[in-house]
Image: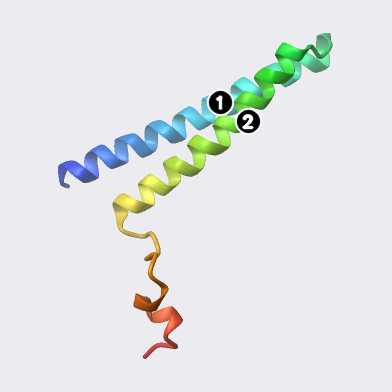
Amino acid sequence: MGLKSILGNALGYTLLGFACISGLFAVYWAGMSVLTGATPGRIMFVLFGLGSMMTSGFFGYFVRKSVAGQVLPSGFDRSIAYRGGQ
């Protein structure tokens, strides 16, 4: 494994871990809002947790796929799938 692969995998897993922690953060504050009442601060925490979960989760997934070389090419004319297998 090269340095690029090791660093990319570490960054991808770090972002995926942060997405999991953000999801737990959002679930905790949503539960607190249900149990003790919603406040503007709690609603903000829930929305922040869900937004950071989605952003870091997709970015971490993309980084891992990019390092593995499994991201589709951006130029569609270079791909066999768009040329009908020719």
Residue 76 x, y percent position in the rendering: 42, 73
Tell me if residue 22 comes above or below residue 72 in the rendering.
above
Amino acid marked by disc 1: Ser
Residue 50: assigned label: 2
Q: Can you identify the residue that label 1 sits on? A: 22
Q: Residue at x 53, y 24 (%)?
A: 21
For the point 55% across and 30% down, which residue is it?
A: 52
Picture layout, residue 34 above or below residue 58: above
Around disc 1, counting alpha carbons within 10 Å, would you say few (fewer than 14), some (14 to 19), or many (20 or more)? many
SS at badge 2 = helix
- Indicate left or right for 53 with 27 as reference: left
Check disc 1 and report its element: helix, strand or loop: helix
> Which quarter of the picture shows residue 74?
bottom left
Q: Position of residue 17 (x, y in %)?
A: 45, 30
Residue 10, relative to residue 46: is it above or below? below
Task: Check contact, mark 2 vs mark 1: CB within 8 A.
Answer: yes
Q: Amino acid at mark 2?
A: Leu
Q: Residue 26 placed where, x, y %? A: 65, 23
Q: Does residue 71 appear left or right of residue 27 in this picture?
A: left
Q: Which colour scheme appears in the figure?
A: rainbow
